[in-house]
Amino acid sequence: MSFGQNGQITIDAEPRIDSLMKKQLEFNKDNHGIEGFRVQIHFGQNREKAQQIRTKFSKDFTELKTYLEYDSPYYKIRVGDFITRLNAYKVQKEISKKYVGAYIVPAIVDYEEVIKK
């Protein structure tokens, strides 16, 4: 790194770093996201009940994105997009006050949602 007299910073980086960054971005795009965590608030076989819980949660926690996943025969409601378990844990503690039994699960999270925060 070098500093110019006009207040600009120039970074001299190894060209392979750019190549690795591009490969990682392509990998993330192919996987539709990056490895991270979500908080699961519901697990059951009734689709209507899952939808009701999802709607109620969206009103209670407007800042968190919700996901309805189906893994036959179960419906799962998962919320948030977190890169670290610690970030997910902080939110899980708040969610648990209203949604007893909420727990952290590994997930492929939406990178665009993560960088919005």
Image: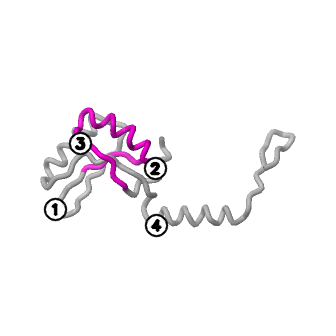
Residue at image location 46% in from the left, 67% down from the top: 30
Which amino acid type corresponds to the residue marked 1 in the rendered image? Pro
Residue bearing the label numbered 1: 73
Is 40 placed left or right of 80 in the picture?
left
Q: Which residues are magenta?
A: 77-106
Indicate which disc, 3 or 2, sits on the residue closer to the N terminus: 2
* Marks 2,1: beta carbons within 8 A: no
Is 96 placed left or right of 4 in the picture?
left
58 shown above or below 105: above
Indicate which disc, 4 or 3, sits on the residue closer to the N terminus: 4
SS type, badge 1: loop
Which amino acid type corresponds to the residue marked 3 in the rendered image? Gly
Indicate which disc, 1 or 4, sits on the residue closer to the N terminus: 4
Indicate which disc, 2 or 1, sits on the residue closer to the N terminus: 1
Say which mark, if any, is on residue 83. Answer: 2
SS type, badge 2: loop
Name the spot of residue 12 as percent of width and height, x first: 77, 56
SS type, badge 4: helix
Name the spot of residue 95 as percent of width and height, x first: 30, 37
Residue at image location 19% in from the left, 64% down from the top: 72
Which amino acid type corresponds to the residue marked 2 in the rendered image? Ile
SS type, badge 3: loop
Q: CA distance from mark 3 to mark 1?
A: 20 Å
Residue bearing the label numbered 3: 101
Residue bearing the label numbered 4: 30
